[in-house]
Image (cartoon, rainbow, N blue to C red):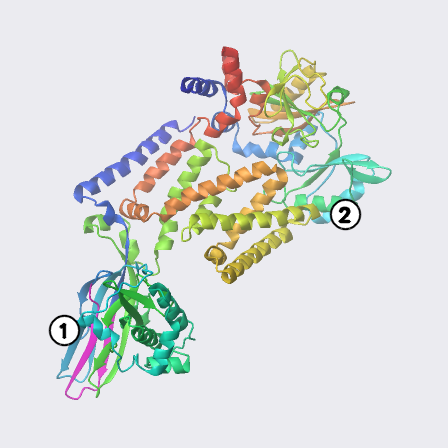
Amino acid sequence: MFKKFRKTRSHLQQHIMGINERNICLIFDHNQRAHYKLADDKILCKSILEQHHVATAISYGTASRIGEIGALWESVCHHDSLVIKPAKGAGGNGILILRKRAGVWYKGSQLISETQICTHMAQIIMGMYGFGHSDCVLIEECIEPHPFFLDIYPDGVPDFRIILLQDQPIMAMLRMPTDASDGKANLHQGGLGIGIDLKAGTLQYAFDGEEFVKEHPDTGKPIYQSVIPYWAEMLEVSRRSSELFPLDYLGVDIILDRDKGPMVMEINVRPGLAIQLANRKGLKQTLTSLKS
Amino acid sequence: MQGQKSYKYTIVLCFVIPVLMIGFKIWKTPIIWENMMPKEVFRIDYEFDVTGIQDQAKVRAYIPQGNFRQTVHPLGAAGDSVAFQQAASPNGLEGIWNVQGRREAFITQSFEVEGKAVEFTLPEQIVVQQEFPDSIAAYLLPSDHIQSTHHKIVGLANVLKRKEFSQTLQSNFQFVAQIPSSNTGLLTDALTTLERNRASCNGKSRLFAAICRAQGIPARVVGGIIMEDVSKRTSHLWVEVFQADHWIPFDLLNGHFAYLPAHYLELYKGDHFLISRTQEVLFDYQFDIKRQYRSELGSAASISGLWPLLAFKGISIPLLRTLLLLPLAALVIAILSNVVGLKTFGTLLPALIGLSLVNVSFIVGIITFAVVVIAVALVHFQLLKWRLLHVPQLVIMLTMVIMVLLGMALAGQVMGWDMARFSVLLPIVVLSITAERFAKTLAEEELPDALKMLLHTFLVAFLCCLIFRSNLIIGYFLTFPESYIALLGILLLLGRWIGMRLMEYHRFSPLARLVTAKSS
């Protein structure tokens, strides 16, 4: 029993990248602190991507002061759907997806008043989602997910995370919402983490936080070995994005739009470690096999 | 990595320097661990100002004498040189100063006193003792100011008497303690206290003694000084009751039942005056008292450590705790976070929580803390739904914290729960921040995650609290402050430690299961 415990322990130590090692050996050794803000600030990040014609969601407008909220809302409210984000938020907090039906706004299936929307923007600016610092509001187009995803699970917006080291993709996963995750694709909120075979462009096992499955737990639709549309383009767009930033270790978040194909949503300096669980493989393992 | 060499050399130095310094100190003066704890002592200066002396003047005053609960070191006299004698009697030790051949004199005499608190548990049944020895039987008899045979007092004594000894004393104590206090410095006797229903320490003590004597329990008043960091003229009077070979203390004014705090200096037994003197002179006096900390260590270790800090005016053990032990507590937090992988609200918040619970029972403190945090977090949860702006919301939280604290304190006072009473003493800002973090986590993550973080926070706070409570660790850092350099060394190592955190073994255990499944 104890021997077995030691065996699994040493196996984990050999293959898995822990948070201490990730910080020291990947983030600190490959990224300079002065460059973090290029990725952390979503508005700055998007402007870099836009300058170099990397496909990204169209920005409708930004506001950095409470006084600007009224004018910003006036200028965007004619759209049928939009997304309100804090520029410095993390973990998907503070993101509001709005759709207009019959002239009134809905947040999911809930009715939401314009006052509530403006209060939300004020909260973003006052730093509620930006670690207490004041923040900016970013309003951009709402992406309609590709039918490939709707087929597996009809709600929410799944996104790809590709981790690159020195502009080379080393690991990727697809994050997909479940009934339990309430439309969010984040792993610790109950979303699925699905591993990806980088070369074949196919989905692998899905990790639901407890175990590995081959089908979506809510719909029963097959996931394992599904061929991802636009995969080559997605790898290419992740490489191009990575080259635009002076960061050697980063995560690129990509959403597949119904009409426009892969679109870069954000760049992450501290991509999480759950991707190892989704891929049933440690980052250390991948790095050593890359070296050899 | 750049600067790898300087990093390594710095770490080596961080460990070599303290080891050499500590080794040298121990080699020069062997350290006895028990002596390393700072001791709280009081320096008390008797100061008499005698003027208008015609021929000669004499001042007598009871001076501190060591006994089972107080240790006294005479420090000698300063001021004018005056003939000084001591006279011991069963009542106490008297100092006698004789001034001759001068018109005025400034007399001082200094002592260092270390007190110890004593607490007695009263037996339920009185130990039947019909015949007391003469020295004790004397304390059953009435005296000028303790009129224990007066009919009013005998009547009262009969009313207050209970079947059991401890209950009798309880009812005597409660009766006298509830008499409204006054600040009069005048002598009040037992009967006057009863008739006026108002008295200071001396009147209450005499009445309590009189009631006890009337019930056949030997009782005497004891005079002394409550040692505080001030100059004062007021002395204090309390009572001792004889039972089963012990004199058991009771302070009626401050409500100490069968208990005497460490800072009570006993000077004399019986109903006497602390100071007596020749009447024909102008006389003024005061007791100048200073709280000090002292180590029993040899002077070599004292000087090379941080012990001289203790001589600073205004420095206290609580302040020292924070100053000296915060680095160690923070190191423990760093290890629990980076090696174990505990997730807490705020990095150093657990240290602040631990610090706030140093002087109360930890369990009780944590329960109070949890009640406040959870109650306020529930309110916060509702506030989030109403989508309030950040700053007003934060102020609502703070106000709620104070309201809950006041409510708990009031409930504690009314219901007599000791645990709830002190809740007002918890630091409001630390509570508000904890509640706010908890509520925020609750809003952003699932309930089990938030509760887990709260649990981790309390766990780390508990360990920090243990550190802050240790006088031995304070003594250690006072003696060997170079250990801080070693702390830096450990932190430098921890800062580049790339091992997996213990919690990560759990997190990635699905992958480990995969391996074992494959191999079997």
Whether A288 is drawn above or below B109: the answer is above
> Pointer 1 indicates a residue of which chain?
B
| Residue B348, visible in the rendered structure | no
Mark 2 against mark 1, which lies toward the viewer? 1
| Residue B327, visible in the rendered structure | yes
Whether residue B415 sits left or right of residue A267 in the image: it is left
Q: Quadrant of residue B198?
A: bottom left
Whether residue B84 sits left or right of residue A20 in the image: it is left
Q: Which residue is mark 2?
A: A115
Q: Secondary structure at mark 1?
A: strand
- The segment highlighted magenta reads B45-66
Whether B421 is drawn above or below A85: the answer is below
Of residue B240 and residue A273, the one placed in the foreground of this image is: B240
At horizontal 55% and vertical 48% (from top left) the residue drawn is: B373
Q: Contact, CB < 8 Å: mark 2 with mark 1?
A: no
Q: Amino acid at mark 1?
A: Ala
In terms of secondary structure, what is the magenta stretch mainly? strand
| Mark 1 nearby-residue class (10 Å; few <14, some 14–19, many ≥20) | few
Whether B514 is drawn above or below B159: the answer is above
Question: What percent of the width, then of the height, locates residue A89?
Answer: 63, 37
At horizontal 35% and vertical 60% (from top left) the residue drawn is: B314
| Quadrant into which the N terminus of chain B falls | top left
Q: Which residue is mark 1?
A: B87
> Pointer 2 indicates a residue of which chain?
A
Question: What percent of the width, then of the height, locates residue B102?
Answer: 15, 83
Q: Secondary structure at mark 2?
A: helix
Is B53 inside the magenta-drawn segment?
Answer: yes
